[in-house]
Image (tube, rainbow, N blue to C red):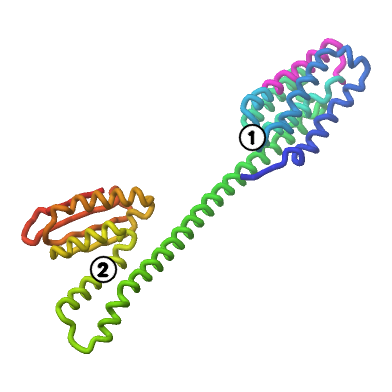
């Protein structure tokens, strides 16, 4: 989001807001013009907070509505004051003063209310003084002023939208980088684990002078399967599942563990719970083939299927 310092952004408009009534105040008999004084009190009481108060760019909705009400009341009070004293010189500040309030309302993210206030200002001035008020009373300047505020408001909203999109994309990119780094770290850990398991057997095989005996051959086969599990099963190969896979293979069951990323976004506790449910479902298996798979982009996280050759229905077919 765009951050704007209120004091820096509102300095010049505040000076302009305070300067506008000066000429009218200096006209004779100012203390007797009660309706203009009331208009000035409203003008300053609303204008200063609109420019300076409240953190962030957007002002509260209640203040924006008060600004709209002020845009209706201020011209009406000045028109009444002029009618009472029969002097159209007083309150010359009201058109641009109201425009300042509406422009600030637009910039502070209530453009529709600013447009409604501008319509009210134009209607009151034209009804009371005719089309000449566009030139004599400065309505043209007020319209341009408010339109400029509407343009600034729209530009700020667009810039904020682009900024939010950029921040969202940046967050996604950082998350992707973190995920990649985590995957690389996990891959390195698995590689080190594979090497720790493989090196003793490879050393034993390379140093052997005779053909491997059945026990060594079986040990090498189990090691090969374990290494394949580490490479294909990846994050699924937690200690509890390793124990279960070893139990099943000890019974002669063919086991395949395939991690496709279905559990990647789960924390360790949730992953442990799901794997424990899978292990519990496999306790009835005594032969055949077992496939444990965690598919990505599915409505389920983990599948466990146990089949026996020659038997159509699976012994276990679970989705978690």
Alpha carbons under labels 2 and 1: distance apart: 61 Å
Report x, y in % for residue 167: 55, 50
Report x, y in % for residue 113: 63, 28
Choose between 93 and 124: the one closer to the eye: 93
Circle 2 packing at 10 Å, graded few (<14), some (14-19), many (20+), is many
Choose between 42 and 303: the one closer to the eye: 303
Which segment did they paint magenta?
69-89
The residue under label 1 is 58
Residue 165 within the magenta-colored segment of the rendering: no
Up the image or down, 218 lies above or below 126; here it is: below
Q: Does dot 2 land on a helix, a strand or a loop?
A: helix
Choose between 199 and 229: the one closer to the eye: 199
Circle 1 packing at 10 Å, graded few (<14), some (14-19), many (20+), is some
Choose between 256 and 144: the one closer to the eye: 256
Up the image or down, 124 lies above or below 241; here it is: above
Q: What residue do we see at 31% from left, 51% from top?
A: 272
Residue 72 within the magenta-colored segment of the rendering: yes
Q: Which mark is residue 226?
A: 2
């Amino acid at each position: 989001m765009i951050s704007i310092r209120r004091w820096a952004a509102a300095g010049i408009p505040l000076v302009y807001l305070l300067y506008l009534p000066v000429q009218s105040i200096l006209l004779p008999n100012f203390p007797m013009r009660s309706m203009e004084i009331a208009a000035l009190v409203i003008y300053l009481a609303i204008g200063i907070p609109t420019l300076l108060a409240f953190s962030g760019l957007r002002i509260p909705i209640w203040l924006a509505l008060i600004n709209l009400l002020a845009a209706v009341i201020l011209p009406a009070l000045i028109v009444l004051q002029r009618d009472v004293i029969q002097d159209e010189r007083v309150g010359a500040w009201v058109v641009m003063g109201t425009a300042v309030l509406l422009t600030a309302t637009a910039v502070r993210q209530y453009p529709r209310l600013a447009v409604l206030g501008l319509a009210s200002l134009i209607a009151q001035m034209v009804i009371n003084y005719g089309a000449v008020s566009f030139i004599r009373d400065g309505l043209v300047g007020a319209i341009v002023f408010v339109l400029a505020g509407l343009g600034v408001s729209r530009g700020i909203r667009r810039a904020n939208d682009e900024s939010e999109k950029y921040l969202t994309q940046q967050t996604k990119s950082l998350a992707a980088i973190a995920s990649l780094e985590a995957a690389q770290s996990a891959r390195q850990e698995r590689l080190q684990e594979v090497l720790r398991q493989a090196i003793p057997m490879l050393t034993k095989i390379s140093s052997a002078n005779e053909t491997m005996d059945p026990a060594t051959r079986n040990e090498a086969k189990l090691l090969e399967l374990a290494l394949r599990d580490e490479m294909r099963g990846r994050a699924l190969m937690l200690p509890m599942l390793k124990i279960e896979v070893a139990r099943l293979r000890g019974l002669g069951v063919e086991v395949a563990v395939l991690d496709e990323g279905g559990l990647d976004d789960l924390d360790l506790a949730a992953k442990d719970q799901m794997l424990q449910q899978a292990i519990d479902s496999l306790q009835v298996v005594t032969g055949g083939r077992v496939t444990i798979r965690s598919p990505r982009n599915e409505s389920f996280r983990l599948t466990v299927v146990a089949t026996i050759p020659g038997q159509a229905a699976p012994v276990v077919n679970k989705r978690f």
